[in-house]
Image: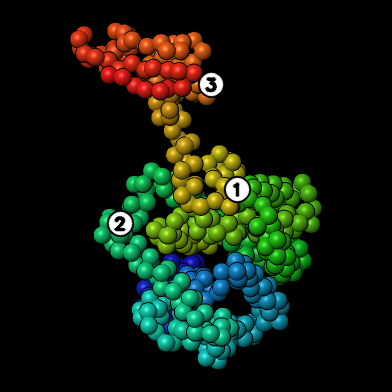
Amino acid sequence: AAFAVGGPFGAIFAGTLADTRGRRGALMIVVWTFLLGGLVQAFALDMVSIIVSRFIIGLASGSSSVLVPIYLGEMAPPTLRGTLGTMTQFAMVIGILIADVLAFPFATESGWRLLFGVTPFLAVLQLLCSPFLLESPRWLLGRDPESRRARFIIKKLRGLRYDQEVETEVSHFVVASQKQHMETDDRVNSQSAVMEMFSDKTVRPFVVAAIILQMAQQFCGINAVFYYSTMFFDGVIDNPQVGTTIVGAVNVVATYVALLLMDSCGRKTLILWSSGGMFFSCVAIVLSLLGYFNNMVALGGVNAYVSFFEIGLGPIPWLIVAEMFDAKYVATAMSVSCQVNWSCNFCIGLVFPYMNKYLGPYSFAPFALVLLGTFIFASLELPETQGTTPEELQAELVRRNSNVVYHNMDIEGNYNVPLDVEWRMAMDQLKLEEEEAMKSGSYNYGFQPIGSSGPTLSQNVAPSSTWASQMGGNAAPNQTQPTISEEGGDAKSMNY
């Protein structure tokens, strides 16, 4: 639980560190924090020392959960951002599996300090590799658009040869940085970004969806399995560590499958499959613990539970935040999501031992209820974000909520009065008739056109009151009007 307490605080300070000390500088501070926590943990004298060390490591973990995605997103080219992002998740589950394997030789009364010593060992390894850790060129250009160091890093990362190519890449970073600063200024001059998100009716449903998914990710009980898997498998199989290691291996395989499915299936579809599959897995686990099935069914239920988690509720609550919110809100939404996730993580780590003690075989029943609620929410309210933009999602939300009909009339949409419809049809018909008359040459432009039915040869066309009225109706009675003399059908003269 101390680890989960430190996580939210680390996430809060990570953004400030990244902006003031740079991405590389912030990551180096996190590495030193890991080293400090690991040394305190490895050389702990009592339980208080272990609790303090877990809190310090939680600070570092919370900071890294914010800094690593930012760093990779700014360093990687656009074509590799998705791959590197998913590979980060893949590396995390591999690390969990390695920790499970190392527990076999070192999880003893004499070897536990060596097991805890893995943390400072990895921190030292990261410090040795730090010369290869480059600063983010986007952060450098945001502070100084003329930074030569940023240009050198871009040239090295992208493998560019010509200065013109480097300047083109620099211009992309500078434009993005300027846009981010403008949006940050807008948020500073307005009310609190969090309150603004909740007050905006077009954004509020997405905030609620992001929070519910983060709560569901933790309250589904996945970390209870990872934190207390040994306790859970005690009595189910002979060696509980074997069950924990099997779960870690299944987690790695399931994450790889999730990488293959993520771009071929919709986010909402995967959430539905994930929550539904985990619900039935929880039912199988409870029934097995009650004695209706043998212990192997319980072990299979836990592995199925972890597998379904990795294809949906594991990665999507983090992925969907960037797809639902535009640049103005995405950082704030990610921060809120991180705080909710770590808080729920803390609750699960603190409460599950008591759930296991007092509920016994029914300890997974509350998780099943959460998963059932998640399935219902996802099927009814969760929008599909794959292949859409935040603007399109907001427009679709407005369109869906505006279809309100009162007394057979849509007050939000477009509707037509019957008289207006008839008038429009009549005008369209008149326009069509005039166009046909123009094409045939029989259209009346204000006087009777000359044709076969007009005046004969040498006939003077005398003005009439009708003709005068059509030309304006202002011709005086004693005014001489023009006459046309025709011979052979050709106009020869006009007399006044």
Q: Position of residue 486 (x, y in %)?
A: 42, 17
Identity, as a three-letter code, of the amino acid under mark 3:
Ser
Disc 1: which residue: 268
Disc 2: which residue: 192
Q: Position of residue 462 (x, y in %)?
A: 33, 10
Numbered disc in front, either 3 or 2: 3
Image quadrant where residue 16 sits: bottom left
Question: For mark 1, does the 10 Å Cα neighbourhood hold few (<14), some (14 to 19), or many (20 or more) residues?
Answer: many
Q: Give the residue at x 50% y 59%.
A: 322
Question: For mark 2, does the 10 Å Cα neighbourhood hold few (<14), some (14 to 19), or many (20 or more) residues?
Answer: few
Q: Which of pointers 1 and 2 lies earlier in the amino acid sequence?
A: 2
Whether residue 17 is visible: no
Question: For mark 3, does the 10 Å Cα neighbourhood hold few (<14), some (14 to 19), or many (20 or more) residues?
Answer: few
Q: Which of pointers 3 and 1 lies earlier in the amino acid sequence?
A: 1
Label 3–label 2 contact, CB within 8 A: no
Real-space Cα separation, disc 3 to disc 1, in angstroms: 60 Å
Q: Nearer the viewer, residue 210 or 45?
A: 210
Disc 3: which residue: 440
Numbered disc in front, either 3 or 1: 3
**Residue 357 located left or right of residue 66:** right
Q: Quadrant of the C terminus?
A: top left
Q: Give the residue at x 46% y 54%.
A: 325
Identity, as a three-letter code, of the amino acid under mark 2:
Ser
